[in-house]
């Protein structure tokens, strides 16, 4: 299950607000208006859109909205909870057999985990389960790479189109040196296109692509834990040994918090019994 990730909109908003404050601190309210140049915006946005259309096919472009949406969401999966789930599944499998795990599938939301449990219930060999699930991870990485490729390319193209706009502005300025009234607007086009392209690349596209790459790494990491857990359950591994094995994937902070919760639960049980 996914929920909103406020850090992406907060970061983008903060970047633009800081730029606005910087402009206001330097030139007052008139300084902000001087940074609004329609021709510069058209050159950067239009050129960027044209380059994207040339580089990618229509099906890939249609995925852009969905891919960018992923940068504004995050998974609420908890690794300690995932480990406790595998301990429970291991205990149930050792007590009632692997077929009893089918009754646990209703409470499992993760389709990758559900698929792994079904493979275990079907009696598939651990090596085969590992190969099947690892192949799905490789396919996921490839899909995610293709999905964020448009955003990465946009981060490359935006500054380049800013430079193209700068060249256009300089040519116009040099062709009209005899008319001083045109020097200011043409120079503004020359400078602001580079400004727009650089800001879009370094505040929106490149950070967003980086975040999507981090999300892919986190998802792959989680799926690797799931593979180890499924194979441990399928092979009848001792639940305590399986717990220790999966806990190796946790950071020290997460282990500390997990131990605190476990101690709190144990203390609560002792008070209740008393």
Image (cartoon, rainbow, N blue to C red):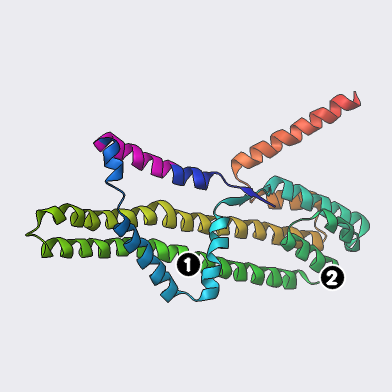
Q: CA distance from mark 1 to mark 2?
A: 39 Å
Q: Check disc 2: other Cα within 10 Å, few if <14, some if 14-19, many if 20+.
A: some
Labelled pair 1, 2 in contact (Cβ < 8 Å): no
Tag 2 or tag 1, which sits nearer the N-term? Answer: 2
Q: Which numbered tag is attached to residue 17?
A: none
| Residue bearing the label numbered 2 | 123
Q: Is residue 120 visible?
A: yes
Q: Would residue 256 be found to the left or right of residue 48 on screen?
A: right
Q: Would residue 205 be found to the left or right of residue 132 on screen?
A: left
Where residue 77 sits in the image (x, y, percent)? 68, 49
* Highlighted magenta segment, given as a residue range: 14-27
Residue drawn 48% across and 67% down? 149
Q: Is residue 6 above or below residue 99?
A: above
Q: Which numbered tag is attached to residue 149?
A: 1
| Residue in front for this viewpoint, 173 or 16 | 173
Q: Is residue 110 above or below residue 79?
A: below
């Amino acid at each position: 299950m996914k929920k909103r990730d406020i850090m992406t909109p907060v970061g983008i908003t903060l970047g633009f607000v800081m730029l606005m404050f910087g402009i206001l601190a330097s030139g007052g309210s008139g300084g902000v208006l001087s940074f609004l140049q329609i021709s510069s915006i058209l050159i950067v946005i239009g050129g960027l859109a044209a380059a994207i259309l040339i580089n990618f096919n229509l099906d890939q472009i249609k995925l852009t909205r969905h891919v960018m949406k992923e940068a504004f969401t995050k998974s609420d999966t908890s690794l300690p909870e995932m480990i406790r789930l595998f301990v429970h599944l291991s205990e149930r499998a050792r007590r009632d057999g692997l077929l009893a795990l089918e009754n646990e599938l209703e409470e499992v939301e993760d389709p990758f985990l559900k698929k792994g449990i079904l493979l275990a219930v079907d009696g598939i060999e651990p090596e085969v389960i590992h190969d099947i699930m690892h192949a799905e991870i490789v396919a996921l990485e490839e899909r995610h790479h293709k999905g964020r490729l448009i955003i990465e390319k946009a981060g490359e193209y935006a500054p380049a189109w800013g430079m193209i706009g700068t060249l256009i502005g300089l040519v116009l300025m040099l062709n009209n040196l005899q008319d001083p009234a045109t020097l200011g607007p043409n120079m503004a086009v020359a400078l602001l296109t580079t400004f727009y392209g650089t800001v879009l690349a370094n505040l929106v596209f490149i950070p967003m692509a980086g975040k999507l790459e981090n999300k892919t790494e986190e998802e792959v990491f989680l799926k690797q834990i799931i593979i180890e857990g499924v194979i441990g359950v399928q092979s009848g591994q001792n639940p305590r040994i399986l717990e220790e094995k999966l806990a190796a994937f946790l950071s020290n902070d997460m282990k500390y918090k997990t131990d605190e919760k476990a101690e709190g639960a144990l203390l609560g049980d002792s008070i209740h019994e008393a």
